[in-house]
Each structure stands twice: as C-alpha cells, then as structure tokens.
Amino acid sequence: MTSPKDNQTDKPVCFQDVILRLQSYWAAQGCAVLQPYDMEVGAGTFHPATTLRSLGARPWAAAYVQPSRRPTDGRYGENPNRLQHYYQYQVIIKPSPANLQDLYLGSLKAIGLDPMIHDVRFVEDDWESPTLGAWGLGWEVWCDGMEVSQFTYFQQVGGHDCRPVSGELTYGLERLAMYVLGVEHVMDMPFNNPESPIPLSYGDIFRQAEREYSRWNFEQADTEMLLQHFKDAEAECARILDAADTDAAGRAIPMAHPAYDQAIKASHLFNLLDARGVISVTERQAYIGRVRALAKRCADLFVTTSAATGEALPTFPTGA
Amino acid sequence: MADLLIELFSEEIPARMQARAREDLKKLVTDGLVEAGLTYTGAGAFSTPRRLTLTVQGLTAHSPTTREERKGPRTDAPDAALEGFLRSTGLTKDQLEARDDKKGQVWFAVIQRPGRPAAEIIAEVLDRTIRNFPWPKSMRWGAGSLRWVRPLHAIICLLSDEAGATIVPFEIEGIVAGNTTRGHRFMAPDAFAVTGFDDYAAKLRRARVMLDADEREAAIRQEAANLAFARGWEIMPDDALLSEVAGLVEWPVPLMGAIEERFLSLPPEVLQTSMREHQKFFSARNPKTGRIEGFVTVANIDTPDQGETILKGNQRVLAARLSDAAFFWENDLREARAGMKDWAEGLKSVTFQSKLGSQADRITRIAALAGEIAPLVGADPDQAARAAKLAKLDLRSAMVGEFPELQGTMGRYYALEAGEPQAVADAARDHYSPLGPSDAVPTAPVSVAVALADKIDTLTGFWAIDEKPTGSKDPFALRRAALGVIRLVLGNELRTSLEVHIAQSHQFLARSIANTRELRPLDHPNYNVGYQINDATEYSEHHREAEYDPNQDYLLGEYEGRPVGPSVSFPAREHVGVFSGQRKTTTDLLAFLHDRLKVYLRDQGIRHDIIDAVLAQPGNDDLVQVVNRATALNDMLKTEDGQNLTQGLKRAGNILAQAEDKDGVEYSFGADEKFAETDAERALFKALDTAEPAIRKAMAAEDFPAAMTAIAALRAPIDAFFEAVQVNTDNQIIRRNRLNLLSRIREAGRQIADFTRIEG
C-alpha cells in the first residue's frame, strides 16, 4: 500500500500532465491512442472511433482526447466550472474486458488518485444519447463525492444491438484535473508545468476564446444560416447514403464515414441553434429525431462494411 | 438436511434495485426448490453493492420418489389411441399393464419418478433464476449473451451438512460456481473460500463487508447520530436516503463536516435538498440556532488519514454546489424584491399544455376561480386571487429551475421578500397540497381557496381536452388532483357544489383560450418562432424513463428556463374546437370525482354499493353531504334493523316494479287506510304517517342519523305487513291500495338513498 506521502510526490503538476498520464496509461493497456476527431462535436462519443466502431463484431480498443463543444454551457469564461469548449478523455474497448473496472481504477492511480485514501464509488447512472439512437447501462464514478467519469456498457448504438458490447469510459478532463491539482477556478489551472520558462494557465489559453464564443453562440450566430446549414448537412448525408455502393469504376465503396460526418455536423448545428434559443421544446424532439435518423442510417451502412465485420477489405483489381 | 449458500457476485448493483432483488432472489429460488419437491426450514436474502446472497436452511437432500398411475385406452382400441397414450406417458407398450375394468381390459401406465438429489435441482433452479431475473433494467457485457443488472463475475453455490460442504456443479455462460468470494473492493480484494453461510458472513466481515443492509443502515444511523451528538447537533431523519446510502457502501464510514458560514443563511430546505440530491449527504441541525449547519457523508472505506482527504474533497464539492445555490438565491431575492414581474412575464412563454395555454393563462384562470371559491372558505376574494397570481411565479426562479422539488417552498420565501402578507405567502407553499394520501390538507382559508382552484382548473382543463387517465397511465397525475379536491373539501367540511365550480372553471378556460394570443397549431410554419410548446405526448415521452415520483408536481412545475422571442398571434377560433362542451366535461369529471371518492371511502371502510346508493341521489356534488349520508347509512346497515329494512324496501320495490311493468302505470299516491283489511296494514299506515315527516324533517336538517333512525322504525311494520298480507289479491281495489301503500315505502327510502343499489 502506498502511503499518502509517497503519493503526494507522484501527483501531476498541470493539466497536460493529467492528459499525458492518461495517454501513457491507456497506451500501456494496449489501446490505440488516437487523435481528436477534426470536427465540432458535443462529446467524445461522437468520434467515429466510438460511435461507428462500437458497431459490429470486430474487436477495438482506442483512447483519445476529444475537444467538445457545448454552446449552451458558455459563461463568458467567468464560471469556475463551466465552459462551452472543454476536453473529454475517451476510452472505448470492444468487447468490454472482464477487468474494465480495475483498468479504470488503475487510470485513477496513474493520475494521482489513490483509491486507498479517496472514496471511489460506482453510482448508478444510465447513459442515453437520443441523437445517436444509443443507450447503455453503467455508473457515474464518484471520487470523494465528485463525479469524475462516466462508465458505460453500450447496449445499442444507431438502433443496432451492440454485439459484442463495448465498454466506454469518459473523463471530464478539466473537472478531474482541477480536483487532482486542487484548483478552484478552471481558468487558474496550470496548463503546462508552472516551472516552465513560459508557464501558461488554462485561462491564458482559453479565457479570450470562451468570451468570444459565448457572445457568438448566444447573440451573434446567424440562425437563418445555421438552419440552412442544418438542412444542407441533412440533405448531403441522405444523398451520400442514397448513392450506389459502387463507384463509376464498379468498385464497391460504401460511404458510411463521409455520411456520418454530415450527421455530426447536423448535430452540432442543432446545438448552436439551441443555444440561440430558437428551438422550441416540441421542435427539439423533432430535430433530435432528424439527427437520429441520419445516425441510424449511417450505422446501418457501417455494419455492412469490413471495418465492422472484421473481414478483410476487398482489394481492387490492379490498375484500378 | 443441508444448508444452501448462493452468492451472485457482480459489478455495482444500483442501490434502488437491491431491496427488490433480495426478495426476488429468495422467492424465485425457494419457490423453484419447493416446486421440484424439496422442502426447507428457513431462508434469508442479503445484498451489498457487489453481491446478492441467499441462504436456505434445512433443505432436504432429495426430492421424494413419486408414483403415478394413468388409465389409458382399452386394449382393443385402435393403434392410434395406444400410440397417443404411449407418447403422453413416455413409456413403451411392454411397460404398460393390462387391467380389468368395468368396460373390459384397459391399459394402465405406472409412472415412477425417482427422487432427485438436491444439487441437481438447485442447479436447474439457479439457472432459471439467473436467466429470468426480473431486474428493472438489465444488460449484456463483453462478448456474452447473458443478461444481468451489471456484469456478473462469480457465483458461490454451496451445499453444506454435517459431512462438510460441497460445491453444487453449476455453470452459466462460462461462469463456474465455486466456493470463493472477495471482500471489500479496496480494503480486502483477495479471493477466499467459505464453508457455509455463517463462515461466509464472518469472513466477509473480516474482509470489511457488512453483508446485511439493515445492519449497514443501523450502523450509519448510529454513527451519524454519535458524530452529530459530539457537536451538539442532530441528524435530520431521511429514511429514503438512508436506505439508498446503505446500498452504495459495503463498509459504511460516516464522516461529519460543517457547512461554511457563508452558506448558513440559505433556507434550510435549500441546504437539505442540495446536499441530499447532489451529494447524498444527511443534514445536521443545530437545535440551538434551528439552522442546518453540518452534514454527514457516508464513505465506503477506512483510510490511514481517518477520512480527512475524503472529507476535504466532499467539502469542496459541497462548496461548489452551495455557491451555485447561493447565487440562485441572491438573484431570486433581487427579483422578488422587484415584484417578480419578470417571472410573471416569463410564465407567458412557458406552455402548460399546448391546448391549455401558457402557465400565465393558467394562473389567470386559477386566480379567477380562487376568487369565486374564497367566500365559501372564509377567505378574502382579492387576497385569494392575489395569492393565486403569485403562487406559481417561483417556477421561473433559478432555484426551482435547479431543484423542481422546491416549488412552493421557494415561492413562500419570495412572496415574503416581496412584502406580501403571510397568508398569501403560505398559499404559495401550500397550494400544491395535499400531494399524496398522507400529505396534510391545508386549512388556512387563502391556501384552501388557491389549492382547490388549482386542482379544479387542472382537472377541468384535461377533461375538456379529453386527456383523462387510462388504466395505469396518468401522466398528469389527475387521480392525485382529484383526490386532492376530495380531501380539501372533506378536510375543511366545505359545503359547496363542485358542479358549479367545474362549470365556472370551464367558463374561465373558454375565456382564457379565447383571449390567448400565444397558442398556435403545431403544424403552422411559424410555430417555431421562439415559442415553447410543451405538449402532452412530449411530456409523457420525456418522463417515461424517468421514475415518476408521486410527490412531485412535475408537470405543473415544468420549467423551461430560457427567455424566448416574441410569439405570433393566431385567431382563437382555431382552438375552440378542441374543447368538450361544459355539460359533458362537468358530467364526466363529476363521475370521475365520484369514482375517486369511492376509492377514498372504501379505504375508510365504507362499501362501494352504499356510496353508489347515496350518489344516485340529487345533490351528489356536495361531497360533504354525500359522505355524511353514506356514513349514516353505513352505520344503519350494520344493525339488524338496517339489514332487514333493506330487504323490506327491496321487496316493496320489486313488487311495485313488477306490477308497474305489468299494468303500465306508476303507483305513486292514493293509498287509503279505509281499504286496509288487516291490522298489519293499518299499522304500516300509522308507522308511515309518523316516519315520513320525521324523515323529511331530518333530511332537511341534514341530520342523517336521525333520518336513519326514522326509517329504521319502519322495519318491523314492513316485515309484519309482508308476513300478513298478499299484495296481489284478486280484489283490484285492495291490490291497487296495497301497491300505492308500497309506493309510500319506496318514497320514504328514496328520500335517503337508492336502496336498490345496496347489495345483499
């Protein structure tokens, strides 16, 4: 057993330290450490590495940081805990290994949370994403009364039963790091090592942007344009999905990923419209249903591809 | 005789499901064992977050051998009949016996079923139990297809007797039953073997697991009380929280902390709700100051620093939560002092129900109705209307947005802050009551007026748009609203005609919808211009998954936070068509209230047929009168006189009905004593002459017991009359006279109740 004192010396010193430790920890557990998806998303779950790869029989293990945008959570950088742009750390393993809880607890140790001196608890919290047509059972993980992660066994994604089941871990990085580092206001959190020649705080990096985006999200975003973009993304998604599976040269190339990008886009546009207060409660359901329909069709297509089934990708005839 | 130990070891089972799961495990396994022919002397089930455990004592080692004889077809019957018999018995022809029967030789099958060893039966029963376990929600994990509440990792299935313990051979989806388990996740994670239940429970305790949830609850209660006592505080009792927390820990370690001074001025309800809902903390009250000043959190671990780190972390989270609450509170108080105009304005854009308008529309209706009801309850109409206008403004407050369960409670604080009189402020808090069958009924006049108006408006509204409860579906808690009306009326002995109030309510509704400029059809292209509609289907969909808490006025407190843009006008006539007419609404709703009244009175020990008999009378929308009558009638029917009188009245009624049917006339008056032939007839005339005015007088004075006494006095003369007299004689004059006499009996009965509805 490590004593609290030993542990003290092993604590991360800044935000990026927490991230780097999670990266090395999950890399050591055999996960492919991916990079963030290059689109605006509301949560790490939207990354195709989770949404699409949780479908089908092919085994999968990935971990990544995902910048997440929640326009309605913007507080002009003033609120100690709320941001419209923040980071999630996401781990997805299929099939969920029997020791996933232990692996998870190991990751807490890696960032300096020793479960022998903290109170770590798994408290029922089922997860549902109406936009993705997805749900799972699991917990929110509490550390000393604070929610530090979501732990979910996916049961359905895009309307498809998950067989096998993926285990998904989501860490809210800012909140977790603030706790580990003992910081009260997110903007005060050291981003790089405070001993660095040029120490940077979270606020140094993001305060200005938070203010600007809060204004744009709440007051400035052109709702007519956003609505049009939503319709465009929806139409393009449908068009891609409706396209023939074979290209002009007769090669079978279904386009689940490009179609799914459009579904992600539509989802984010919906969030922006929501932040602008132009979506009524009844409409909200309708919009969510429209995005879900797209996500579901993307999933329908993805499960037919070798990325899901694990079969070898057919090679094209030479010279093609 | 043997003892059975079963442990199903899994990842964390949701706290709220554990109690039920214990019962289900015990029932499914013991029922299965008994069904298979085993007997046992006792059983007990236990749960921790990570395990479900069952112990069965005194289990028989084998099921008994059974022997069954079955008679088959005659030996000379066609082959097809014999084949069918063989199939159904599972025997071959040479195993059958031919025996002589009355009708000749018949095949007999003697089926011996040898007893089976307990282990074999247990394995089957356990397999069935696991596969069919009634979890509210279950899941798959990994690559398997088994379902459990969370991943199932290990199973103990152990039979033990004097000779020792043996593992019951059992496997399910790759999990092989054994005799080992693990202790506390962090403090004693290693596996250990057990030999039986006592050994299991003792070793678990050493491995820092308290198996029994009751014991964990008691330990938490005791230790929390000790911690509080040391500071001169007391724990606010909260049984629901206690049982939840006991389901979240295997080794409860209560830790006490103080709330920072800067938060102590928050209302106690806010502190308690925030701590309970967000942190699962118990609240500690300082009896000297009357304030909530501390909390108890229950950790799941003993740490080298005696919980210091854990407590510090919890305190930090609490401070963040309470900072939010304090921020809401201060903003809300500012708005309250400014007169809450923004909230009132904001409620115009919160839809109550798409066909019933906004919350603001609804409040206008309730205020109007409360003004009408006020004089009846001794409240000032203006004050009642004012209270109704303020009562729901807190739905727009930040605090209620965060904690919907504080609706009303906050309303009272804000009304006081706004300088409103105490009675008005109290009505804000109390007008939602009574929420459940055991919730107190408001008695302050202004509160009663608003509470009643609120509920009647809700009921009338949903009846008018035909959104009534069906079967188990009652998404708008209309049954509860109806029971609320009943309890408010009865609890305050309100002598009033509900029919009148429903009609008033319907008129206000029609007027309110005619005036509204905010309601739009859902399919109109402009309906999305900043208007928030919250219609019934969406509401029920939204709440389908969420557990419905009958103590929460979710719908009525439905809160949509963001201010929205201007809405678009629509001609009101488009909406008028959605309402049922006033007549139909009133009749249907009154019938529903009567149904709920029957349920309510049945619980008070009054039979439904007695209530039916009273409800068939005029004035049945005056519930106080209905109940008084029903109670008096109920009391009378418990007496022998009452029972026999009912028979006599029914007999009179039946004879009359037959005669009227046959003769095509109604016998109603004209009985004359001069045509009486017997003393019994004359005595009945005399008795009626006495009883009729007595009943009339008593009924007019609403002295129902006196009316019952008066009519009960008819029992003997009626009995004697039927004993002595044949009503349908050949002499038509005498027959008609007797029928007319019977009609006087019928009439006397009708003054009190419709006795034909009384059963027995």
Image (cartoon, coloured by chain):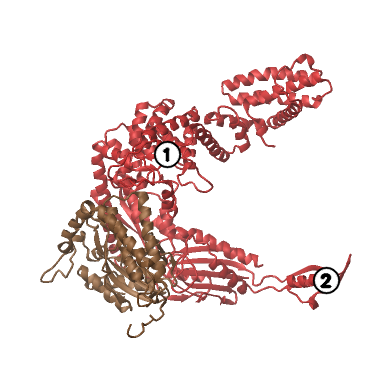
Chain colours: A brown, B red
Q: Of the residues shown, which amino acid type is indicated by label 1?
A: Ser
Q: Is residue B515 above or below residue A99?
A: above
> Which residue does the numbered mark 2 point to in the structure image?
B78
Residue at the (23%, 52%) spot, across then down: A218
Q: Is residue B747 above or below residue B274?
A: above
Q: Residue furthest left?
A: A197
> Which residue does the numbered mark 1 point to in the structure image?
B433
Q: Of the residues shown, which amino acid type is indicated by label 2?
A: Pro
Label 1's element?
loop
Residue A64 picture quarter: bottom left
- Residue B682 can be seen, yes or no: yes
Q: Nearer the N terminus, badge 2 or badge 1?
A: 2
Q: Is residue B370 above or below residue B36?
A: above
x, y percentage for residue B556? 39, 43
Residue B391 picture quarter: top left
Q: Is residue B35 left or right of residue B597?
A: right
x, y percentage for residue B735? 79, 21
- Residue B301 can be seen, yes or no: no
x, y percentage for residue B297? 34, 57
Q: Name the image quarter holding the C terminus of chain A.
A: bottom left
